[in-house]
Image: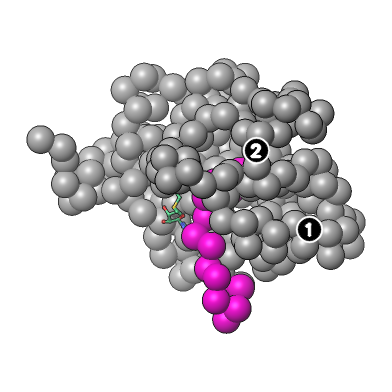
Amino acid sequence: MSKGKLEKFAEIGTFPNVFQLPSLHNSEDFSLKGKWHKEYFKNDNPLVLELGCGKGEYTVGLAERFADKNFIGVDIKGARLWRGSKTAFDNKMNNVAFVRTRIDHIEKVFALGEVDEIWVTFPDPQPQKTRERKRLTSPVFLKRYANILKPGGIVNLKTDNFPLYDYSKEVAQELKLELLAATADLYKSIEKAEVAYISKNAELLQIKTYYEKMFLEQGLKINYLSFKISALQNG
Ligand SMILES: C[S@@+](CC[C@H](N)C(=O)[O-])C[C@H]1O[C@@H](n2cnc3c(N)ncnc32)[C@H](O)[C@@H]1O
């Protein structure tokens, strides 16, 4: 029988690769901020985040393919994080960790320049105009990312939701961020080799999260956007 939410919650408390920081808004910076490389991973390899990682398929999938990079999945839902953290723990993957917190407080977990790349995988689209600030690709969140990424760090978005893709692309353009790739149909772009950046990264772009598999079964197209954050870091 599969484990219930409470059991999963209890179990992640015992995993050394999970850091639970649900109330960061009331507290000081997390103790590993600025020290992830030295004190946790014990190497200088690039650090890649998956924000709103859910069960962490991208985090684990990337970590399996890139032993020379470190990966951290971030989500507020502990029972979901259990899946990825258990796989990483059982497989002794020492380049993976998970943080349970709200992404709103990400600057308390990572220092400026500590992160090389960010993936935002199938975020809640927050379609109501009044909830724009909650979108993980709104200017509010992009400024937070600019405060933890290295100069020229990259943000990737994968979504089934065309309006969110379109909105994110517009925000990136308004903020003068350098677009690396933009497609409203990722798998067609891969098949037709339409965009050089996508062809170059085709293998990792085809890692599928839990939500992506669901959306593909429903026949939905996958949108992908990638841009550099530099313009937000230069002033
Ligand atoms: C639609 S699910 C996608 C999960 C996973 N990326 C996937 O593709 O299967 C969105 C996830 O983002 C998380 N999330 C949304 N807003 C968040 C926030 N502000 N802080 C932390 N997690 C958040 C939710 O808990 C949820 O697990």
Q: Residues within 10 Å of mark 1 (few under 14, many from 20)?
A: many
| 115 or 165: nearer the viewer | 165
State yes or no: Cβ of the residue under disc 2 lies below 8 Å from any atom of ligand 1. Answer: no
Looking at numbered disc 1 in the image, what kind of residue is underneath it?
Ala
Secondary structure category for the residue under label 1: helix
Colour mapping used in the image: one colour
In the picture, measured across the screen, residue 122 lies left or right of residue 116, that is: left
40 in relation to 100, above or below: above
In the picture, measured across the screen, residue 36 lies left or right of residue 52, that is: right
Residue 224 on the magenta segment: no
Disc number placed over residue 172 in the picture, else none: 1
Looking at numbered disc 2 in the image, what kind of residue is underneath it?
Leu
Which residue reaches farthest bottom? Answer: 130
Q: Residues within 10 Å of mark 2 (few under 14, many from 20)?
A: many
> What is the x, y in percent for residue 18?
39, 41
Residue at (69% x, 51% y) in the render: 148
> What is the x, y in percent for residue 88?
39, 27
In the picture, measured across the screen, residue 98 lies left or right of residue 203, that is: left
- Region rendered in magenta: 119-132
> What is the x, y in percent for residue 230?
84, 50
> What is the x, y in percent for residue 13?
28, 44
Q: Nearer the viewer, mark 2 or mark 1?
A: 2
Q: For mark 2, what is the residue?
A: 186
Residue at (89% x, 62% y) in the render: 235
